[in-house]
Image (cartoon, rainbow, N blue to C red):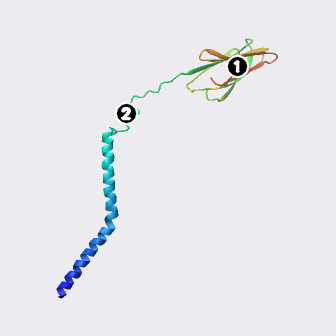
């Protein structure tokens, strides 16, 4: 009888430890099964919709081409031989101030969709004028006369 009790007690200990192990690993085991099934489903969907390599042609053969470049020409004119103090916006709206003999001109080019053109000039003579041309079309032209004449041209959106 002692043998029967000993074997029954040993069997109970073994089954108890197997149940204990199963209680500990059932959540990680279920997680592994769910991840494996999810991976299989995603893999099949990728094959079905032909999206194996989403970045296969990324950047290959793409050339950035300038579109509708704007060419702005600033002109300041007046009595030949006189000088003028000139202030103007560049394509990034930064102010530039120079002193130059008349006539004076500068050309700016940009691919920005919109640019503000501002030109101000004050001369040492009695007549001065300014002109802003965008893509060959005169958008603004002003003249002034008087002692140390001053004028400005403004195009809000070129």
Q: Classify the position of the C terminus by image quarter.
A: top right
The front one of 76 and 21 is 21
Helix, strand or loop under label 2 = loop
Q: Classify the position of the N terminus by image quarter.
A: bottom left
**Nearer the camera: disc 2 or disc 1:** 2
Seen as rendered, the residue at the extreme bottom is 1
Q: Quadrant of residue 116?
A: top right
The front one of 3 and 150 is 3
Gap in angstroms between the C-alphas marked 2 and 1: 52 Å
Left or right position of 39 against 79? left
The front one of 19 and 67 is 19
How many numbered circles are shown?
Answer: 2
Figure check: 93 above or below 77: below
Q: Quadrant of residue 33?
A: bottom left
Q: Residue at x 17, y 85 (%)?
A: 3
Q: Residue 75, how many percent across, how many down? A: 67, 17
The front one of 49 and 77 is 49
Seen as rendered, the residue at the extreme top is 80
Helix, strand or loop under label 1 = strand
Q: Mark 2 points at which residue?
A: 57
Alpha-carbon neighbours of circle 1 within 10 Å: few (<14), some, or many (≥20)? some
Q: Residue 100 carries which label?
A: 1
């Amino acid at each position: 009888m002692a043998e029967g009790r000993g074997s029954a007690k040993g069997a109970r200990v073994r089954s108890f430890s197997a149940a204990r192990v199963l209680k500990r690993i059932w959540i990680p085991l279920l997680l592994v099964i769910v991840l494996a099934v999810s991976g299989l489903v995603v893999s099949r969907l990728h094959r079905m919709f032909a999206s194996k390599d989403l970045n296969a042609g990324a950047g290959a053969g793409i050339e950035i081409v300038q579109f509708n470049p704007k060419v702005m020409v600033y002109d300041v004119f007046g009595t030949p031989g006189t000088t003028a103090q000139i202030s103007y916006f560049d394509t990034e709206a930064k102010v530039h101030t120079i002193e130059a003999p008349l006539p004076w001109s500068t050309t700016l080019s940009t691919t920005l969709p919109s640019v503000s053109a501002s030109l101000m000039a004050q001369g040492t003579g009695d007549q001065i004028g300014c002109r802003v041309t965008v893509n060959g079309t005169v958008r603004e032209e002003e003249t002034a006369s008087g002692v140390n004449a001053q004028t400005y041209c403004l195009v809000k959106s070129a």
